[in-house]
Amino acid sequence: PPSPPEPPPPEPVRKPSPLEVFTSTLSFKGFIEEETGKMVFLKRGEDILIVRKEEMIDGRFLVVDIGEDRITFRDEDTGEVRILNIERD
């Protein structure tokens, strides 16, 4: 009898984008509402980042918007947009 067909090759592993890596390192710690808008506190490793809308992080990632339950970032090098959902404790 003929031999069974070869199994299909495995799917290539997709490397996460720089923006995916960046947002995966962040956790929401809180925010302050001011007249000029929200200031959000994000933890990254041992560091606390304090950011506002339209601020750049690491010279590459723009805070596009800060909503009630999410923060939108854009990678200025690639144009990719990602949303970080805010998990409140």
Image: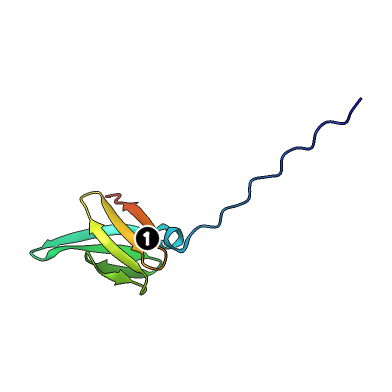
User: Which residue sits furthest top?
Assistant: 1
User: Which residue sits furthest right?
Assistant: 1
User: Which residue sits furthest left?
Assistant: 35
Residue 32 figure quarter: bottom left
Residue 6 figure quarter: top right
- The residue shown at (60%, 52%) is 13
Looking at the picture, the colour scheme in use is rainbow
- The residue shown at (46%, 63%) is 18
Please tell me which residue lies in front, 64 or 88.
Answer: 64
Q: Secondary structure at mark 1?
A: strand
- The residue shown at (44%, 58%) is 20
**Left or right position of 24 against 11:** left
Instruction: Please name the residue that numbered disc 1 is placed on.
Output: 26
**Residue type at mark 1?**
Leu
**Left or right position of 55 against 22:** left
Please tell me which residue lies in front, 3 or 21.
Answer: 3
Instruction: From the top left corner, tell me how far across and down residue 28 is, in percent.
Output: 30, 57
Instruction: From the top left corner, tell me how far across and down residue 45 is, in percent.
Output: 41, 66
Please tell me which residue lies in front, 33 or 46.
Answer: 33
**Vertical order, 60 against 82 (above or below):** below
User: What count of labels does the image hold?
Assistant: 1
Judge the density around disc 1: few (<14), some (14-19), many (≥20) Cα neighbours within 10 Å: some
Please tell me which residue lies in front, 87 or 57.
Answer: 57
Instruction: From the top left corner, tell me how far across and down residue 8 is, in percent.
Output: 72, 39
**Vertical order, 33 against 8 (above or below):** below
- The residue shown at (31%, 68%) is 48
Instruction: From the top left corner, tell me how far across and down residue 52 is, in percent.
Output: 22, 66
